[in-house]
Every structure is written in structure tokens, then in C-alpha cells.
Image (cartoon, rainbow, N blue to C red):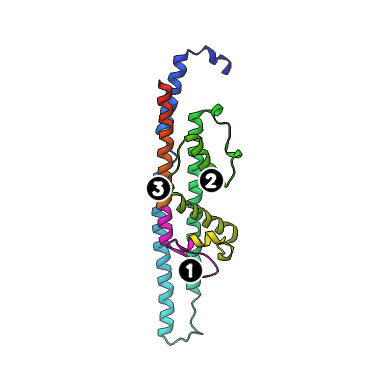
């Protein structure tokens, strides 16, 4: 079929190309509905976590009220509830970074489709860095834009936290000094114990940061495609 492409009139090729670009311009890898569902999921799990902890604390109080000593009172339920809380919040961090990676991959594909293979001499595999930074560099290079510098630190810290959780199970001593310093300044992150403590406050802030980051990139990729449409329409 490609061998017959030269038989297609130029104005038809241009019309088809214009149609493809318009469609790509209107698309976005930013799934608002997915993030809204995640926000709901976080609130629901937090309600369950708080109910669990409250019930276990009440059980311990009742044991003390009945005359139990500190050696006799069984507080294993609180330990289990706090462990469950830790694992759930860790999973939130991992999910947010996975969602971010999926979004960046989708935006790279959208921009690549708009530009065409021949106009992309260096692909993702040729760029240095982790899966998030490589995709960011790709978008900035071929989209001819810069992601807002105000949005980068929070996302970078989220990724650093995710890596610590995935690779060392949240061990504080394994954090690099600069990462440790940055995370210590994030509300909702506790670093006083052996393992990183992630509070609900941090998850809410991280979710807002990811939303802002994705919105910024999506809008700029759309603008890059719009510029391409304007150039080709001349």
C-alpha cells in the first residue's frame, strides 16, 4: 500500500495530515477521571484507616479501664493497624509515580505522532536518566518548551520517595543526604524513625502536584502541536 502513496494527490495528503494533527491537538494523556477516582479512593481508605485505629485504641483503653497493667494490655491490634496504614500510604506513593510515568509516556507518543519519526533523530533510549526524566527531556526537546520550574521539585521528591520505598522499603538511612534534606521539609513526611512515615497530608499534596504537573505538560504539548498546524497551514 505504501508503494501507491505517490498516487494520492498532494491536497488529499495535506488534508489527511491536517486532520491527524487536529485530532492529536485535542487529545491528552491526562486522565482527569482517573485522578478524581484516586482522590476518592484515598479519602475512602483514610476513613477506614482512622476507624481501624480508633477501634483498636478504644479496645486498649477498655483494658486499662478494667484494671489491666501495661504488661497485661494487648495492643497488638494497634500495631497491626499502624502497619496496614503504612503499607497503604506507601502504595499511594507508588501508584502516583506509576500514573505519572504512564502520562509522560502517552504525551511522548502524542508529540512523536505529530512530528513524525523522521523529525526525531534522538529517541527516549538515547537520553540519559530515569524513566521520568528521560520522558521530560524528550518532551521539552521536541516540544520546544520548558516545564514550569515551580512544579519540578515536588514531583522530583515524590519520585525520590517512591524509589526509596520500592528499593529499600522506606528505610530512612538509605536516603541520600540531599534527598533526606528535601523530604524533611515536606509536610506530611516523617523521618524520625527507621522507616519513612507518610501521612495523609503528604498524599493530598503529592496528588495536587501531579495534577498541576500533568496539566502543564498537556497544555504545552497541545500548544506545540498547534504551532505545527499553523506552520503547515501556511
Nearest to the observer: residue 163 or residue 34: 163
N-term mark: 2 or 1: 1
Highlighted range, magenta: 183-207
Residue matched to label 1? 82
Residue 156 seen from this side? yes
Residue at (58%, 15%) from the top-left corner? Answer: 3
Q: CA distance from mark 2 to mark 1?
A: 34 Å
Q: In the rendered image, which quarter contains the C terminus?
A: top left
Check residue 57 for magenta coloring. no
**First in residue order: circle 3 vs circle 1:** 1
Q: Residue 139's spot in the image, x, y percent?
A: 49, 38
- Is residue 88 visible to the viewer in this orientation of the structure? no
Disc 3 secondary structure class: helix
User: Which residue appears at 50% of the width and 34% of the height?
Assistant: 142
**Total count of labels:** 3
Q: Element type at marker 2?
A: helix
Amino acid at each position: 500500500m505504501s508503494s501507491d502513496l505517490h498516487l494520492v494527490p498532494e491536497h488529499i495528503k495535506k488534508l489527511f495530515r491536517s486532520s491527524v494533527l487536529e485530532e492529536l491537538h485535542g487529545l491528552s494523556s491526562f486522565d482527569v477521571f482517573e485522578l478524581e477516582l484516586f482522590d476518592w479512593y484515598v479519602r475512602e481508605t483514610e476513613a477506614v484507616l482512622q476507624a481501624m485505629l480508633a477501634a483498636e485504641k478504644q479496645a486498649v483503653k477498655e483494658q486499662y479501664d478494667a484494671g489491666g497493667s501495661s504488661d497485661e494490655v494487648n495492643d497488638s491490634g494497634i500495631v497491626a493497624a499502624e502497619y496496614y496504614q503504612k503499607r497503604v500510604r506507601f502504595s499511594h506513593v507508588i501508584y502516583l509515580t506509576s500514573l505519572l510515568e504512564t502520562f509522560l509516556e502517552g504525551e511522548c507518543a502524542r508529540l512523536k505522532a505529530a512530528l513524525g519519526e523522521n523529525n526525531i533523530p534522538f529517541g527516549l533510549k538515547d537520553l540519559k536518566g530515569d524513566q521520568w526524566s528521560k520522558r521530560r527531556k524528550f518532551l521539552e526537546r521536541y516540544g520546544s518548551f520548558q516545564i514550569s520550574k515551580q512544579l519540578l521539585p515536588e514531583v522530583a521528591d515524590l519520585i525520590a520517595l517512591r524509589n526509596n520505598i520500592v528499593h529499600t522499603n522506606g528505610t530512612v538511612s538509605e536516603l541520600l543526604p540531599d534527598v533526606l534534606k528535601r523530604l524533611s521539609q515536606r509536610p506530611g513526611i516523617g523521618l524520625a524513625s527507621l522507616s519513612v512515615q507518610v501521612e495523609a497530608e503528604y498524599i493530598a499534596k503529592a496528588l495536587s502536584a501531579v495534577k498541576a504537573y500533568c496539566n502543564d505538560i498537556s497544555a504545552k504539548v497541545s500548544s506545540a502541536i498547534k504551532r505545527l498546524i499553523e506552520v503547515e497551514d501556511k
